[in-house]
Image (spheres, rainbow, N blue to C red):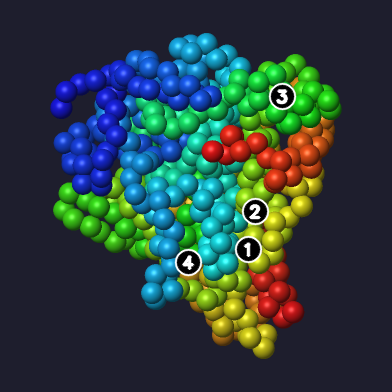
């Protein structure tokens, strides 16, 4: 078998296709930051434990640090740079601003990408680990503080801004009723 | 990280063929465990065969009431599936109890079955570890082992299986399907994971070069009343210190059918058959549940720093079976 330790890929990010050649070892996180200069996505632990690198892949949140770039070809990646509608912030971004859902801000892009997905997942009636009855007949639980904290548990905030983060997610969730949802992020 | 070749398998046959031709190759599913282990040097494949896109992404009810789950189904899709939640709620709960929303979106069923232990010595290439380097020793026995095994371990390895999903699958008699160079194979989960013995580096009975294609859960009406409960050191997003998957059928105060499996106590999901035998036909009381837990845990051999797991598991058995019995009585 011919040896190929790097691969030419077409990476679709925020609606644009980028042709680049990556060492197969390159994570999506490093491809975004080092190849495409999209530095909004942050590197925290680089081992899938902190959530700072959270992006949306085919509309679903994922840790970019554990996603090989070469394996992301053909998939639609959305980063924090791609969630706003032009100059109009995404409702989750606006809620984080309005309610101080951060302190230093380093984890914030990952928190926002994750929260966008949390609201979509809840609208799709997904249960969580704190949902008392997971049977579909029980219906989805209200997106209360306990549910938000569980669903956001993959995003750590070393400043401990969780109280404001929970408020921001709750506010954005009540604002983004299913009819008003931004369809682009769940494409 | 060692350099590697990357191939996206067009179909199962190509994946199995590539693996057969490349002994240093590994299958890539969601990558949540493998990529992490490659970064730390625990895994050093020369080739990754990407199988995430293979068409094993369906969950289907078959004619005989069994449920088949494709190997590339993500944890998220497994836990959200209405039939899983209706027929095997403990399986949905087990999956939801593991990892984070991001990781569950990436991780696959096939990869989940093959994920490696989170023993700190296994994950640290500067330390001896019989699972990583056979014959190098097991520092956990006299070292950090507060979250290690109490059942089925050997002096060669005391690590635990980290999977929540596999605990529920063990309770419900799952059968693993795989393609191999020699043809398709079906392995009951009870025969899928090898005992530790003196070969902790050998973890499953899968033949070399095998590709897991799916898991089948036989019809099990008892599973409709089932629960997974996990105890961990923080409220969410942590591996278990102990967990239990339980299903219970009680009629007129008598146990008709029961399924019990424990997590975070052994190198594999621990089906508690002694406890099940002790319970069937007997009264559905807290005393009987405690006695059954004791029967299973009589074989436990805790180490100095994980003795807490014996009463932890016993208490989980009593608490969860009591809840299920109360539900049945309503």
Q: Earlier in the sequence, mark 3 or mark 1?
A: 3
From the image, tell me which residue sits under label 1. Answer: A136
CA gap, disc 4 and disc 3:
47 Å
CB contact under 8 Å: marks 1 and 2? yes
Residue visible at 22% across and 51% down? B180
As helix, strand or loop, the secondary structure at mark 1 comes to helix
Q: Earlier in the sequence, mark 1 or mark 2?
A: 2
Q: Position of residue A72 (x, y in %)?
A: 42, 29
Residue visible at 38% across and 74% down? B63
Residue visible at 29% across and 61% down? B186
Q: Residues within 10 Å of mark 3 (few under 14, many from 20)?
A: few
From the image, tell me which residue sits under label 2. Answer: A125
CA gap, disc 2 and disc 4:
25 Å
As helix, strand or loop, the secondary structure at mark 3 comes to loop
Which of the 4 image quadrants contains residue A44?
top right
From the image, tell me which residue sits under label 3. Answer: A89
CB contact under 8 Å: marks 3 and 1? no
Q: Earlier in the sequence, mark 3 or mark 2?
A: 3
Q: Residues within 10 Å of mark 1 (few under 14, many from 20)?
A: some
Residue visible at 49% across and 65% down? B171
From the image, tell me which residue sits under label 4. Answer: B172
Q: Position of residue A47 (x, y in %)?
A: 52, 27
CB contact under 8 Å: marks 4 and 3? no
**Tag 1 subunit:** A
């Amino acid at each position: 078998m011919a040896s190929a330790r790097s691969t030419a890929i077409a990476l679709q990010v925020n609606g644009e296709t980028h042709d680049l050649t990556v060492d197969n070892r390159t994570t999506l996180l490093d491809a975004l930051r080092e190849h495409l200069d999209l530095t909004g996505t942050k590197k925290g632990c680089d081992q899938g434990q902190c959530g700072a690198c959270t992006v949306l892949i085919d509309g679903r949140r994922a840790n970019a640090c554990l996603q090989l770039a070469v394996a992301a070809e053909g998939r639609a990646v959305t980063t924090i740079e791609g969630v706003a509608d032009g100059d109009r912030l995404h409702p989750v971004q606006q809620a984080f601003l309005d309610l101080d859902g951060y302190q230093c801000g380093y984890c914030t892009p990952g928190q926002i990408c994750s929260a966008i997905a949390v609201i979509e997942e809840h609208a799709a009636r997904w249960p969580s680990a704190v949902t008392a009855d997971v049977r579909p007949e029980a219906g989805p639980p209200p997106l209360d503080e306990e549910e938000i904290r569980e669903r956001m548990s993959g995003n750590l905030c070393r400043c401990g801004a969780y109280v404001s983060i929970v408020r921001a997610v709750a506010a954005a969730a009540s604002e983004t009723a299913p009819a008003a949802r931004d369809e682009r992020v769940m494409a | 990280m060692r350099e590697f070749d990357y191939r996206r398998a067009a179909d199962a046959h190509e994946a199995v063929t590539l693996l057969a031709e490349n002994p240093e190759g590994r299958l890539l599913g969601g990558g949540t465990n493998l990529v992490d282990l490659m970064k730390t040097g625990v895994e050093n494949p020369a080739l990754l065969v990407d199988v995430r896109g293979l068409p094993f992404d369906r969950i289907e009810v078959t004619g005989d009431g069994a449920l088949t789950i494709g190997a590339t189904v993500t944890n998220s899709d497994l836990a959200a599936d209405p039939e899983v939640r209706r027929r095997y709620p403990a399986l949905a709960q087990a999956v939801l109890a593991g990892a984070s929303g991001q990781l569950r979106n990436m991780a696959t069923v096939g990869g989940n079955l093959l994920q490696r232990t989170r023993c700190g010595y296994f994950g640290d290439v500067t330390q001896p570890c019989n699972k990583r380097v056979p014959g190098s020793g097991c520092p956990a026995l006299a070292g950090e082992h507060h979250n290690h095994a109490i059942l089925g371990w050997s002096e060669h390895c005391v690590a635990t299986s980290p999977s929540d999903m596999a605990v529920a699958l063990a309770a419900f008699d799952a059968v693993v399907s795989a393609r191999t160079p020699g043809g398709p194979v079906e392995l009951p989960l009870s025969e899928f994971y090898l005992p530790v013995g003196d070969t902790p580096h050998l973890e499953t009975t899968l033949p070399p070069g095998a590709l897991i294609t799916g898991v089948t859960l036989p019809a099990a009406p008892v599973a409709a009343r089932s629960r997974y409960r996990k105890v961990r050191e923080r409220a969410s997003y942590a591996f278990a210190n102990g967990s239990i998957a339980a299903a219970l059928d009680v009629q007129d105060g008598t146990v008709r059918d029961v399924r019990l499996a424990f997590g975070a106590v052994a190198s594999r999901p621990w089906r508690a058959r002694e406890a099940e035998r002790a319970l069937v036909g007997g009264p559905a009381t807290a005393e009987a549940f405690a006695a059954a837990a004791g029967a299973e845990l009589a074989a436990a051999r805790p180490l100095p720093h994980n003795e807490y797991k014996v009463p932890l598991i016993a208490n989980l058995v009593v608490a969860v079976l009591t809840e299920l019995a109360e539900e049945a009585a309503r």
